Amino acid sequence: MKIVKTEVITGWRHGRFVFEEQPLSNIMRDLSRWYDFEYEFADPNVGDIVFLGSIPRYADFKTAISILEKSGGIRFSLTDGRIVISKITS
């Protein structure tokens, strides 16, 4: 039996994007639809990074990407009108 966390499914009703072990590729697909932007990964493996957490659905775009940057070791940059997502290397 699999335990279903209802907040992941119903988070939108409470004004949040909720990510429960979601790959960044899925998160970016959802965010790009909501905020209407195009994106690409600098390295395709960046899309496989898994996140756990939530973002306020009605936050501005800068706040949403700031939350992801702080929690996932990634960086967002704007290149030729597209958001480019890369992994921060130390």
Image (spheres, helix red, strand yellow):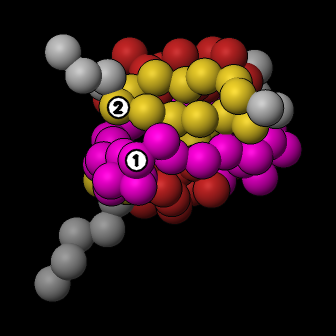
88 to 45, vertically: above or below: above
Q: Depth check: 56 or 4 in front?
A: 56
Q: Which residue is mark 1?
A: 43
Quarter of the figure with the N terminus:
bottom left
Residue 19 shows up from this direction: no
Q: Which residue is mark 2?
A: 87
Q: Residue furthest front?
A: 80
Kind of residue sitting beneath label 1: Asp
Q: Nearer the viewer, mark 2 or mark 1?
A: 1
58 to 18, vertically: above or below: above
The location of residue 19, given as percent across then percent down, is 43, 47
Count every numbered label the image shows and give the total: 2
Q: Residue at horizontal 82%, vertical 32%?
A: 81
Crowd rating for badge 1 (residues with CA inside 10 Å; few <14, some 14–19, many 20+)? few
Q: Depth check: 10 or 36 in front?
A: 36
Asked which secondary structure carries label 1, the reply is loop
Q: Residue furthest bottom?
A: 1
Give the side of residue 46 with respect to residue 28, left or right: left
Q: Residue at horizontal 60%, vertical 22%?
A: 77
Give the side of residue 37 with respect to residue 23, left or right: right
The location of residue 46, given as percent across then percent down, is 36, 46
Q: Residue at horizontal 48%, vertical 56%?
A: 25
Range of residues picked out in magenta: 30-57
Disc on the earlier residue, 2 or 1:
1
46 to 78, vertically: above or below: below
Residue 6 shows up from this direction: yes
Asked which secondary structure carries label 2, the reply is strand
Q: CB atoms at circles 2 and 1 under 8 Å apart?
A: yes
